[in-house]
Image (cartoon, rainbow, N blue to C red):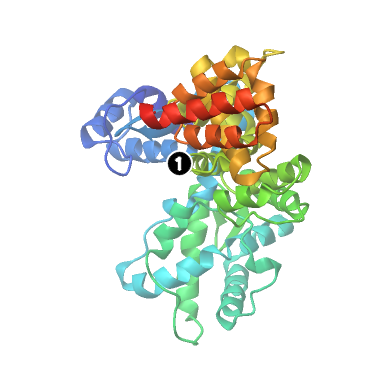
Amino acid sequence: MLVDAVRIARWAGELEQVDKRGELLPEDARAAGRALAMTVGAAAKAWGQALLVGLVEPRDGGAAPGWRLHAWEHDDEAVVRGWSALFDAWTLLAPVPPAALRGVFAVLAGQAVDQAPQLLSFLHLVDGPVSDGELMELLRRGLDERRMGAGTGLLSLSPVPHAASAVSAVRGTCREPQVDTPPAPSDVAAVLDWMLDGLAAVGAVIRLDEAAELSPLGHWAVRAKLEEICTVAQTAAGHIEQSALELLNACADYSPGPARAEYRAWVAARPVDRAVAELLDAAQGDDALVRGLAFEALRVAGGTAEQAVRAAVDEPVLRPYALLWLAEQSDEEGVSPADVLGAEDAAWLWVDTAAAVLDHGETGLLVGHVEGASAGDPVRLFARARQSGHPRAASVLTAVSGVHPDPAVARAARRSAFSVHNGGA
């Protein structure tokens, strides 16, 4: 199903320029069509699939091969998870409705997307063809429950974490309908037809004569989503609906085991590339504790986060954490932080973690933080901290000078803090 997407991703390699939506420029679409014996339309469709699956990624105004393309030949899990990303974005591949329907349709379709998990679960349980009429009745009941405010139970939750862009593409900026009248049967039928066409376009549903059934891929997708729900259900705190920043702030008070359970559930409840991007974005904030916790959460994502973390090495704020994370993911045993981080990176990381202690822990812990890193030479440690360029260097050194019991060490910290102020670090 994705063979053309793979072919065009390999053909493209590193593209210097794509349009604002990440799609091929017309001349590149024509070139791809000639090289791969496709029509221009087929080339554009294959490129769109490659983007959704993660075979190619927009980068600096152009596009480059994604990590899934590198893994495609040797990792079956990457292939099936790549298809799962396409399945999550089924609304983007559904045909646009006729112009006459778009007013009512935009509102109904946005609501119907939330009912898709119920329809898919029903098709999975039946495990055979279901008539369009039966599916329409199921959809109508779900829409009525939503309209009447009854959909507050389990089925009102969406176990299919479709991409935010897919939902916004359907809903646009429209608001919930302000009328209490039920939708017309013809409108419900049109929305159901649109949903089934979209699910068929990604290979999850097979459309028959006035009936539909799940494909083998569709059954796999539903089982995978149900497994994710079971993982989520095992966590007591339930932070899966929160942002990455809210998750990390909440987990700051947890011991490592429960925190990992929350990270695992949170990552499982959304497309992994989106989860990784959100965690890295949260890690770039001012809170050093959140930064450290973000990379703890990224350990749960494992190898699927490698490409994004590798790119994060170029971000000064993330560089030491990213280097350590990558070293842990390698197969080498006995690698210590000293083997991975240069003096500058190590000093920056020391100041950053000290800032986390200063903001969230007891200042007395700074003494142990100094002793653990100074190797009997705190003056040298403070000099490196002073030169690290970390924006919190002065405040950390000042705090150390105020709590360290050794007057000589306290004076050295105070002098280094003063020189940071004077040196413009």
Depth order, front residue of 48/239: 239
Identify the secondary structure beneath mark 1. helix
Whole-percent x and y of residue 102? 35, 70
Residue 321 coordinates in the image, percent (x, y): 56, 28
- Left or right: where does residue 257 sit relative to residue 166? right
Mark 1 surroundings within 10 Å by alpha-carbon count, few (fewer than 14), some (14 through 19), many (20 or more): many
Q: Residue at x 67, y 47 (%)?
A: 252
Question: Compared with residue 211, is residue 11 higher up or lower down, i.e. above or below?
Answer: above
Q: Residue furthest left?
A: 27
Which one is in front, 210 or 103? 103
Compared with 423, 101 (above or below) is below
Horizontal arrangement in the rendering, residue 171 relative to residue 159 (left or right): left
Q: Is residue 253 above or below residue 212?
A: above
Task: Quadrant for the C terminus, please.
Answer: top left
Q: Amino acid at mark 1?
A: Leu
**In this picture, residue 183 sits left or right of residue 377:** left
Residue drawn at (43%, 51%), measured in percent from left and top? 93
Please state if 163 lies on the left or on the right of 44 as rendered.
right
Q: Residue at x 74, y 48 (%)?
A: 231
Q: Quadrant of residue 48?
A: top left
Q: Along the line of sight, which residue is nearer the eye, 149 or 133? A: 149
Residue at which label 1 appears: 52
Residue 268 visible within the image: yes
Q: Residue furthest front?
A: 407
Counting from the top left corner in percent of width and height, residue 275 is at 55, 43
**Whether residue 72 can be seen here:** no
